[in-house]
Amino acid sequence: MKIQKSIFCFVGLLIFYLKGIQNRIGRFFLKYLFKSVGKNVKFQYKDIFTFRNIVLGNDVYIGPHATFLAAEAQISVGDKVLFGPNVTIITGNHPIDLRGKFIYDIVEKMPGEDMPVIISDDVWVGAGATILKGVNIGRGAVIAAGAVVNINIPPYAIAGGIPAKIIKYRGQKTDLEKHEIIIYGEIKTDFNYLD
């Protein structure tokens, strides 16, 4: 029984290791499809990306089963950003007010139907969150698991819900200013919105 368990453990570890190699090789080649990609970016090679309109900064981790769709507008992700599993970002909509055509057959876009998504540095997006067109997520923000974000999120805000609302902030103004001095060497955010 112990020998059988040892063999199964060995085979399991071997499969795990080989899948890791496969992912690293796939990621190595797929990085060249992005509009631009920084250093130390990790994603699953099987995830769904419209590469040509996606910009990723340095030290970005995208959890498994991500879907980043940027048909015409751009998705920009800053540095030191974490995405949990099953995160979706979509920069566009389909027109629904044209008469005489099935939605499936409409290919032309109206102004405002595709808008960029900007995610600043030091953001954490929880598992299963969805970020929709035109959203700007500020530095240091946290998006709760399962949130549907259709509004801009200010720096250091914690947002969650469907649709997402600001729940609270990651600290008081003075705490966040100290945080930025430690991290960046200076205060980079205008915290007047916290007064």
Image (spheres, rainbow, N blue to C red):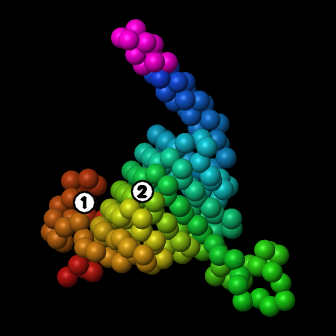
Find the residue positioned furthest to the front. 1
Count of marks placed on residues: 2
Q: Please give the label number shown on residue 180.
A: 1
Residue 27 visible, this orientation: yes
Q: Residue at x 26, y 53 (%)?
A: 183
Specify whether 95 is left or right of 26: right
Q: Quadrant of the N terminus?
A: top left
Q: Residue at x 63, y 63 (%)?
A: 70
Q: In the rendered image, which residue does mark 2 sit on?
A: 127
Q: Given the image, on which type of amino acid does mark 1 rest? A: Glu
Q: Residues within 10 Å of mark 2 (few under 14, many from 20)?
A: many
Q: Given the image, on which type of amino acid does mark 2 rest? A: Ala
**Residue 106 occupies which quadrant of the picture?**
bottom right
**Residue 134 occupies which quadrant of the picture?**
bottom right
Residue 121 visible, this orientation: no
Q: Main secondary structure of the magenta part?
A: helix
Asked if residue 32 is positioned above or below residue 189 in the image, the reply reads above
Residue 6 part of the magenta segment:
yes
Relative image position of residue 74 (x, y in whole percent): 60, 64
Residue range corresponding to the magenta coloring: 1-11
Mark 1 lies on a secondary structure that is: helix
